[in-house]
Amino acid sequence: MITVRFAPSPTGFLHVGGARTALFNFLFARNQKGKFLLRIEDTDRERSRPEFEKEILDSLKWLGLGWDETPLRQSERISIYQKEAEKLLSGGLAYEEVKEGKRAVIFKMPRREIALTDLLRGEVRFDTRVFEDLVLLKSDGFPTYHWACVVDDEALGVTHVIRGEDHLTNTPKQMLLLEALGWRVPAYAHLPLILGSDGTPLSKRHGAVSVAHYLKEGFLPEGLVNYLALLGWGAEGNREFFTLPELVEKFSLKRLIRSSARFDLEKLRWTNAQHLRALPETDYLRRASDWFQSENLIPAGFPEARLQSALLLFRSRIQTFKDLGVEAPYFFRDVESYDLEAMNRSLGEPGLKEKLLDLKAKFEALPDFGDVVKLEAVLREGAQKTGVEAKVLIHPLRLALTGKGVSPGIFELMKALGKDVCLERLGRLLEKL
Ligand code: GLU
């Protein structure tokens, strides 16, 4: 059976590069009806942290990349690595080095040429004469990365190793170990690096790279997964929108792209927006509302109905949930200041105050603001009566309600904010005139 593993080290958060590696392993396994296993490589005792492990697993779950079986934790398998090392020692393929009573086990590097057939880049040859002998067990009894990796790839029955290109030079060493033990050498695919916008490998310098950050920024896991899938893989044709099940169906190692991929936040945002729009309306509302709750962005006592109206009104204008708060803070908070340019543009009409007072009285007479047709009729009537174009009233009204010069359609907006909020805000602007 096709068996792959994702093997994060819990020394940091799950970042974009790791998530893409996990995703490709997951897609390959699910497409091939194989196994997707998880291995926690926590033998670096100084840098590994349980919080990071939890965060990595939570991020994978959030992305929808469920794994098979209980994750294997390397720190619980120390005696196994020690036992396996004895095999190489007794076969004369490794030697001991004892210092101050402590023993390290070291693999005698066979000095020769070795060819690796990478599924992406074809044959890659290495001359192992440039490699040093390889420490397998350190003097504290703990395995090195290479040793634990090789023992566990065998133990898990891994058939395909899909990992980042940064591991390419590790692979010949691991192959030699596998061969020395008479174990099966898996197939390898080394994924090209992900670069930042400036063409250097993606790192913290390029801003946030953790998966959890994108959750906090109001992205959908569907959007992030879709975007990550296209960083180094492409389906036939130019299609760019995929759900996770569609990716599972279409994924193939044959369509991995050899050249490095560039992380483009704008493209990620665009992709996320496509997924926001594709959600059934009730899902969209529930998930957005959950996100606003979990990020504590909803003031106490804030009416759920107003959040829903805002979400619907802005659905086609936002790319992430967070954008709603950025684009339309006036849904969540009172208008505290007015955009200066919009003020200059919209408050110059002679006798504007009287016209707006008159309009306010007319709006007050409506039982509620639930009917946009009625709202529009009232405004147009008021404009006609006072002999001005509708926009002469609409612009100051928008300023009053939003503090801004641009917004969605004013009547939709009035409906969404509700009568009380609208009249109060209009009143506040009038006080300033
Ligand atoms: N723990 C290694 C890493 O995080 C995984 C290496 C591997 O996949 O073999 O890079």
Image: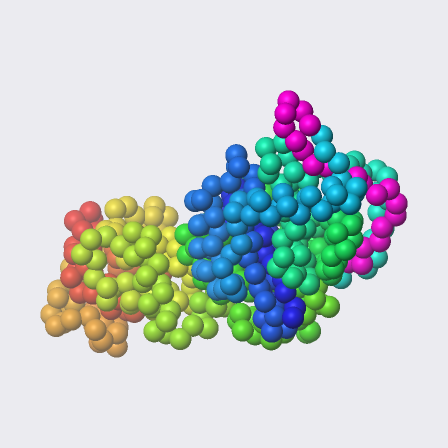
User: Which residue occupies the extreme front position in the image?
Assistant: 90
Instruction: Please tell me whether residue 14 belongs to the stretch shown in magenta.
Output: no
Q: Which residue is located at x 65 percent, y 55 percent?
A: 153
Instruction: Give the answer, above or below, for where 206 lies relative to 70.
Output: above
Q: Quadrant of the N terminus?
A: bottom right
Q: Where is residue 402 in the image (x, y as percent from the top left)?
A: 29, 55
Q: From the viewer's perspective, is 271 left or right of 276?
A: right
In front here: 242 or 7? 7
User: Which residue occupies the extreme top position in the image?
Assistant: 100
Q: Which residue is located at x 71 percent, y 47 percent?
A: 87
Q: Position of residue 72 (x, y in %)?
A: 53, 54
Residue 163 seen: yes
Q: From the viewer's perspective, is 30 left or right of 344?
A: right
Q: Which residue is located at x 34 percent, y 68 percent?
A: 285
Q: Where is residue 152 in the image (x, y as percent from the top left)?
A: 63, 53
Residue 207 seen: no
Residues in magenta, as a range: 98-118
In front here: 236 or 69? 69
Q: Which residue is located at x 21 percent, y 58 percent?
A: 302
In front here: 399 or 185? 185
